[in-house]
Amino acid sequence: MSTLYLPNELHDYINASPIYHITMPSKGPVKMNFGQVDYICTQAPLENTCGDFWRMIVENNVGIIVMLNKITNDVTPKCARYWPNRMHDRILYQSGSMNFQVKWTGRNSQPAYDERDFSVNRDGHGMRKHHVRQLAFVNWPDQGVPNTEEFNIMLNEYKELKAVSKTGSLTLVHCKTGIGRSGTFIAADILRRHLDEKCKVIDIPGVILQLRRCRPGMIRSSTDTQMINRSPLQLIQTAHSIELIANIAATNVL
């Protein structure tokens, strides 16, 4: 499935795909659970689709946005800026007959990522607001591979955010096309989850195959697969180092 639909509008198509839960391998390859959606993967919004973008977020109960591209790359636009220019400002976006007011409410800047908090109010719904946090990783070179340590710092921050997010909320992941970097992040997060669940075997080709069933063309370049291989390897090495240090500390105490 490669599209989502916005109900009750004449022009209801949006280039986004639901990504279903991928189970860890157990006596065979990884499998997909079609009864559970974990992510929405989409291309970056354009100037004329920002309203549809926010509508999709509200109507699909998105709690976290993962942004993997810059607004511009030198001169070439990567995506529209879909939030206000200054913190505490508001901006109004339209999707069909609906209006969505977006307010930038908070920011946490780190060397590896930026976090921004937004509240979204749909016209006609009074004081009822939808709150969403954006996790932006912009240190991804064009035609290249990001720093693995920085990428995993961002990946672990996402894990922490997801752990405290509203039950049942989804994560929306976007890059310019919604295929390469987005697929890489989602695959790395799935593999990270499998490692956290004490999976003894990680099935990288199987995860990629299942993701392509959800959104054709995902993880399309050698740099994408290179990142997917590097990320879990460093996570394993880091976890082993922490365990080794803990064992040494315990031995010294004894």
Image: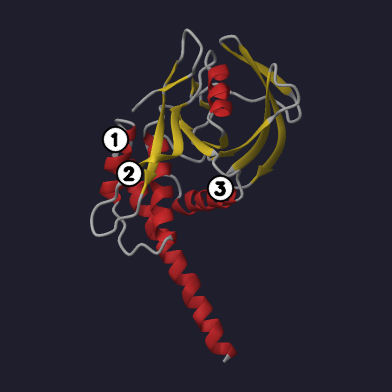
Q: Residue 32 carries which label?
A: 2
Q: Residue 240 occupies which quadrant of the picture? A: bottom left
For disc 1, the marked residue is 213
Asked whether residue 216 appears in the rendered view, the answer is: yes
- Mark 1 vs 2: CB contact within 8 A: yes
Residue 101, x across and y down, in percent: 68, 20
Q: Tell me what residue is drawn at x 40 percent, y 64 percent.
A: 198
Specify the amino acid type for callout 3: Lys
Under tag 1, what secondary structure?
helix
Quadrant of the frame with the C terminus: bottom right
For residue 223, side relative to residue 247 (left or right): left
Q: How far apart are marks 1 and 2 (CA)?
A: 9 Å
The residue at which mark 3 appears reads as: 162
| Relative height, residue 98 to residue 226 (above, below) | above
Query: Which residue is at a point 64% across and 25% down the rendered structure image?
Result: 83
Q: What residue type is labelled 1?
A: Arg
Q: How far apart are marks 3 and 1 (CA)?
A: 24 Å
Would you identify the image quadrant in which residue 91 lies? top right
Mark with earlier residue (3, 1)? 3
Q: Nearer the viewer, mark 1 or mark 2?
A: 2
Q: Do the residues labelled 2 and 3 touch (CB within 8 Å)?
A: no
